[in-house]
Amino acid sequence: MNEQPIVWLKTEAQKKRFEDHKASVTPLHDGNLQFHSESIITPKGYQKTNKLISVVPKPDETVLSLDSASYLFQELKQMNLILTNACNLSCSYCYEQHNKDFGRFTNDSLLKAYRFLVKANNRQRKVFQFFGGEPLIHKDIILDFLNKNEKEIEENAAGEVNTIIGIVTNGLLLSQELVDKYFSYNFTFMLISLDTDRASVDHREIGQDKINALMEQIKTIPHEAKMQKRLTIRCTLARENAPHFSSFVDNLYDRGVRRMVVHPLVLDSSKGFIRWSDTEWSNLHKDILAVLDKYDDFQIHFSEGVGKKGEENCMIGSDMIAIDGSGDFSGCYFFTNQKASSTSETILGNLFQQKIYIDRYKHFQKEYAKMFEEEEQCKTCNYKNACYQCPAGNLDTGNRMFRPDDMCQKIVKLYVDLQEDIAKKQFQKKYNILVNAATIEGENYSFSKGLSYLLFYYFYSYHPTLTKVHDGIELVDDYRKILSLWKKIIEGKDTLSPSPDNYIEEVYHKLDDSIEEIGDFYYFVLERGQLAPTNNKVNTKNNTIEQKAFFLGLLHMVVLIAPHKALEDTFSHKLTNAS
């Protein structure tokens, strides 16, 4: 029996609301684009006056200058540039309008936004990301920006605290010429939204022929770029396509894909709130883990939505902002896209006008905190440090920006379980590497290298180059001295310079004759940070190399993986503020 495509039944009210969501661009056979809205900026419209439409704050709102509120962007790691709201698709689960743009970006305005992100903070791997609608409608401005600013972008992408270029696209407007040019730069990354390789279970209704063509286009993306995980597939997992997830990954893997971001669909613009059965949810979990077991070099990450409870509030742009051509920005691309509607007060400021609407930040954070204080489900939630919220979906399917529902805890559990399972695999791999290195290079040298890396990451909060933390480490005659210094730093008895320029030299000169066994240090870390019970300690004296490698592997888990996995306070914060 042939599988039948999904057909959604819509109410009259929904039909009216969906008018603005219809595809406003149609690709023609000759490669040109046909536009269906006069309020959309076309690629050939750059000779026209650039009319910038921005939100005007109320007279009684407090407006700060961008410079005076720089503290708001200390955690910013991603900026989505909405080049256009136009799109060649009308995905059933998407909330965006595709009929109106609010101004166009120029090379100068893009460069201004880019430099703001670069200088906003010292976070590692920030992403300056072209977004839409469908950003490839304006592929020329993307390529022009990369070409004109290649040297500056390359320099900023090369450092330890770096900024890379990304693009989010449905992939249907990709051409071989564009693929070759875009990936000719070493700082470019691409995320293609593709939910399945089966049209019969696809919410995007693009047809099997176009899906097949896109799968073939993915194959042509340079192999090196895919091995470097510069290509990511974003998969919205719905109840209909989830049963085919494993075979979909097999198909992608055969085409060189090594990285995926998954987003379980629980809020749908056409169907409202979606409740998965326990069986469906359990099967999805098993299928994801089966894929990770099958492919050691394939990465699966969770999409946006799960964050640190009480802190990662997308309404205030905790770590991401979305900006349009007028300079207006919000914490979510949906709200920047919909700013002409009743959601205009979600705009947090204007980057090009150097304005911050601080009252809105305070209001959204207050409303977010109120949910945890008043909602019974939140007060009794077992996941004390993690929460799933999507204000855009909440408002589209109800009337409250923040609210718990039947699926939020399941999503958090899936996220945490997935991270824990991934961490276990990473630990086994790290343990084997440590034992092998100790056997070949010697215990002291190999352990000194590992501890030097971990201490650097603990103190400076970003991943160093191996050269910075390994060159000269052979001078250390006992790796246990590094552990002793690290313990003093945690206790506030010593510290390192704010700049890591002379890291190895400084660490070496701070070492004295005091030592700390690696097992004892591991238990000290657990107790100091209250990270895990330490009632059943194993013997830490006269350990074998394998036992010491086990403790060093656990330290890698705690320092590099656990804070992200458990969604708790950062490792450094926990230890520094321990009583």
Image (tube, helix red, strand yellow):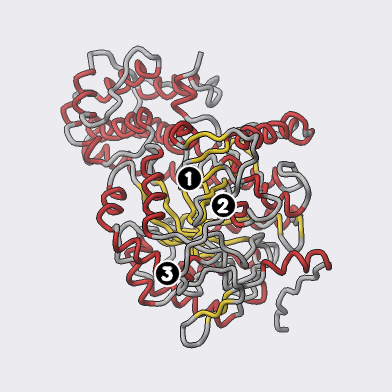
Residue occupying image coordinates x 53% and y 22%? 530
User: Residue 543 has which mark?
Assistant: none
Camera-side mark, 1 or 3: 1
Whether tag 1 and tag 2 are in contact, CB under 8 A, the answer is yes
Q: Amino acid at mark 1?
A: Gln
Establish if 15 lies above or below 578.
Answer: below
What is the quadrant of the N terminus in the image? bottom right
Mark 1 or mark 3: name the one nearer the start of the chain. Answer: 3
Q: Nearer the viewer, residue 323 or 8?
A: 323
Distance Cα–Cα, label 1 vs label 2: 10 Å
Q: Amino acid at mark 3?
A: Lys
User: Residue 353 has which mark?
Assistant: 1
Residue 537, horizontal then vertical, whole percent: 49, 21
Residue occupying image coordinates x 70% and y 35%? 367
Estimate how packed mark 3 is, as few (under 14), some (14 to 19) or many (20 or more) residues with alpha carbons within 10 Å.
some
Q: Nearer the viewer, residue 353 or 473?
A: 353
* Number of callouts: 3
Q: Is residue 286 visible?
A: no
> Horizontal placement of 62 versus 81: left or right?
right
> Horizontal placement of 501 versus 126: left or right?
left
- The residue where tag 3 is placed is 139
